[in-house]
Image (cartoon, rainbow, N blue to C red):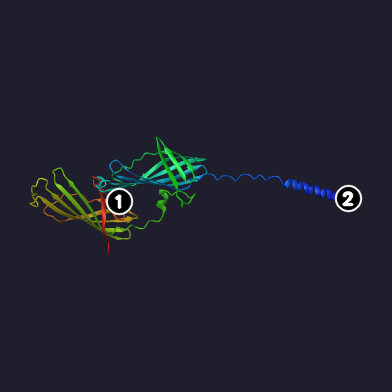
Amino acid sequence: MQHGRVGVAVLAAVGVVAVVACGSTRPVVRPPPPRAAPDVSGTWDWDVEERNDDGDTRVEREVWHLSQKGRDIEGYYDRVLTVHSGDGRPFECYQNTRYEKFTRFRISGSIEGALVRLRETSYETRPDPCDRGRRSMTAYVGHLEGGTITLRWSPAGQQVLRRRADAIVGGPPDTMASVTQKPRPPAASIAGLWRWEWRSIDANGDERTAREDWQLRQREGRVSGTVDRTVRVVSGTGVAFSCSQRPEKVVVMRYALSGEVSGRRVELTELTQSQLAGSPCTVDPSPLASHEGEIGIEEMVLSTSSANGERHVLRRISPQTGE
């Protein structure tokens, strides 16, 4: 009897092993890993360069900053249009062979799968006397594929945004409000000699050339200096001017000014004016004016508060060498 119980136990154990062994041969089915949800957060770039019918070169660049939360998308993009003269002649309004326009567009939209819908909700432009700053706003339908978003808009527009490799994904988009809360940027260097020149022919046929030499000093954000304006007028008929007894006259005026620089922005105000040379000849008197604009490396673009809204593009001749 004892041997019989042992045999039964052995058979039972063998049966369990057999069941386990049979069970281990069944294939293990694992569920597929979940697919990552599409995310457009980050920085995207687009640019194009083309030549128009006048031979001018147009370079347009856009940098898109997008942030996605769930299906909702918010952000903005900066558009910079730079135009270079094709024939070397200055553009009439800008008095230069190159000009630049800047616009910031606010963006809102959504994403569903690879389908992206975006629309421009508002925009901001920099002050520009040659541009009223009016912009139309656009709605886009796009397709996200890898590192690109292909955007289309009515009637037949299309552009491809490319994700910037070093962009920080998921960061909040920068805004004009947040920019103003950042520490004030260091003042750009404005000290030294700047020059502006212009030539025109008036209604009487007289040729007028003007040159302004801006000698500026800077201490941190404060600016002071003088502007020497030399105006030469040549008679179009050859008749002598009564003040000079010659068919030309030259008058030199000096303006003292002061102002301040914040980052690359500058504001200057004329304080006094006096005539240095050319008496008894004079030029058309003009009231003291104020100027504001942006400082570049080689150029400074100033808009003037005068009635005709003059715009000066000054070229840097030499930097300040000492106090």
**Residue 62 location in percent, x, y?**
39, 46
Residue 61 percent coordinates (x, y): 38, 47
**Does residue 224 lie above or below 98 as drawn?**
below
Along the viewing direction, whichever of 304 and 270 lies nearer the viewer: 304
Name the residue type under label 1: Gly
Quarter that holds the C terminus: bottom left
Q: Say which of 85 and 285 sits in front.
A: 85
The type of residue carrying mark 2 is: Arg
Residue found farthest to the top: 155
Query: Would residue 149 appear left or right of 227 to someone viewing this image?
Result: right
**Mark drawn on residue 293:** 1
Q: Position of residue 76 (x, y in %)?
A: 42, 45
Seen from the viewer's position, the closer of residues 249 and 299 is 299
Among the 4 quarters of the image, the one containing residue 278 = bottom left
Residue at image mark 2: 5
Can residue 284 be seen here? The reply is no
Q: Quadrant of residue 129?
A: top left
Sequence order check: which comes first, mark 1 or mark 2? 2
